[in-house]
Amino acid sequence: MPRSAGTQLGESINFKSDLKLINMTKLTNCLDTASIYVGTYAKYNNSSLYGKWLNLGDYSDYEDLLETMRELHKDESDPEFMLQDYENCELFEKLGLISESHLSPGIYEIASQIDDSGHDLEVFEACIDCLGRIDFQSLYEYVNNFYYGEFSSDEDFVQWLYEDDTFNIPNWVVIDWEATARSIMYDYFESNGHYFKS
């Protein structure tokens, strides 16, 4: 990397000014795009797919949603709900909060914690992709303690790490960032551009 104007031999290089840290302010209510298609097992067993798509963000809490589901299938005295399909619920599915026969009452509380975390839903999705099956509280703590940000490449991330950790690299040192990134990435996870300490 060439020295910037005014840099003297032996001064540290400011890499961060040369990097583009991807904007992390895409925060939205994580239930705004999550939706479920609600039928019942009784109808399904009688060859009926009757039901309706419900957007989870349209309801204030689980009880509000449940009331709508009961009203939708009020022709059954005790409907056994079947979530025949759902969209934008990958994280909730991986957390065990949603399946064909189950919707956790805690989904709204967890969504609220995600919304209040200061991180976009995709950060939590990236983290669970790196860690695998994990409970939400552990996932939440991991994101808050070990999330570094979103970068366009391992090399950009490693350059940012070197500057952020203030290694004070003299400007005459030439670093092979690709090789350095390969070595350093043994200590980090990455998914979809999101970086975490391993």
Image (tube, rainbow, N blue to C red):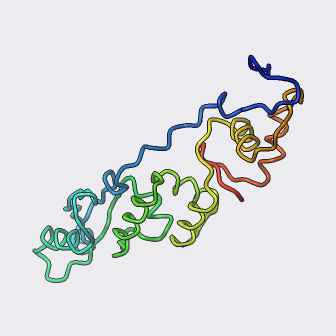
Residue 13 drawn above or below residue 160? above
Left or right: residue 137 compared with residue 10: left
Instruction: Give the residue displayed 46% in from the left and 51% down from the top.
Output: 120
Q: Between residue 137 and residue 133, name the one nearer to us.
A: 137
State which quarter of the image contains the C terminus. bottom right
Instruction: Give the residue at the far bottom of this rendering.
Output: 78
x and y percentages locating residue 99 in the rendered image = 40, 68
Instruction: Give the residue at the far top of this rendering.
Output: 5
x and y percentages locating residue 88 in the rendered image = 39, 53
x and y percentages locating residue 175 in the rendered image = 86, 32
State which quarter of the image contains the N terminus. top right
Quarter occupied by residue 40: bottom left
x and y percentages locating residue 8 in the rendered image = 83, 23
Residue 107 drawn above or below residue 14? below
Quarter occupied by residue 25: top left
Left or right: residue 140 compared with residue 43: right
